[in-house]
Image (cartoon, helix red, strand yellow):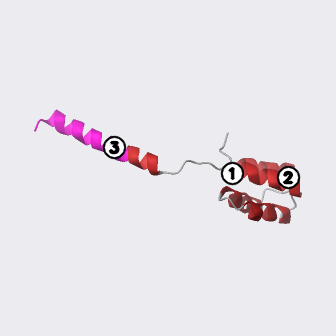
Amino acid sequence: MRTSTRFAGVLAGLAVSLGGVALGAPAARADIPACVNTAVQAGASATDAVTAACTRGVSGDLTGCVDGLAQAGVPGGAAGGACRLAAQEPR
């Protein structure tokens, strides 16, 4: 087998394997910084508790997210809005 043919085959295999990894990886659909910023604008401090609550929103636990932000001092409406932002794709 010629070296150029072998090299082309290796490159093709590499491209297919890397493409499969990219397709298998979940897309980033979380905007934790937007959630934290909204909570801070509503009066909370940017603490680990706020980040943890926003992280719950990412996983779809909106109730846990809102409850966590409420415990951190974020009013209900702002907490709900921040948690909805957590589940959105970053901008």
- The amino acid marked with disc number 1 is Ala
Residue 3 lies, in percent from the top left, at 15, 36
Question: What numbered label is drawn on residue 19?
Answer: none
Q: CA distance from mark 2 to mark 3?
A: 45 Å
- The amino acid marked with disc number 3 is Val
Residue in the picture at 68% in, 51% down: 87
**Which residue corresponds to mark 2?**
78
Residue in the picture at 75% in, 65% down: 64
Mark earlier in primary sequence (1, 2): 2
Q: Secondary structure at mark 3?
A: helix
- The amino acid marked with disc number 2 is Ala
Residue 50, can we see it?
A: yes
Residue 86 lies, in percent from the top left, at 71, 51
Contact flag, marks 1 and 2 (Cβ < 8 Å): no
76 shown above or below 2: below
Residue 16 lies within the magenta run = yes
Contact flag, marks 2 and 3 (Cβ < 8 Å): no
Mark earlier in primary sequence (2, 3): 3
Q: Which residues are magenta?
A: 1-18
Residue in the picture at 28% in, 44% down: 13
**Which residue corresponds to mark 3?**
16
**Which residue corresponds to mark 1?**
87
Quadrant of the rendered image containing residue 5: top left
Residue 54 lies, in percent from the top left, at 73, 57
In the displayed structure, does residue 82 sit left or right of residue 58? right
Q: Secondary structure at mark 2?
A: helix
Residue 23 lies within the magenta run = no
On the rendered image, what quadrant is the N terminus found in?
A: top left
Residue in the picture at 24% in, 42% down: 10
61 shown above or below 24: below
Residue 48, can we see it?
A: no
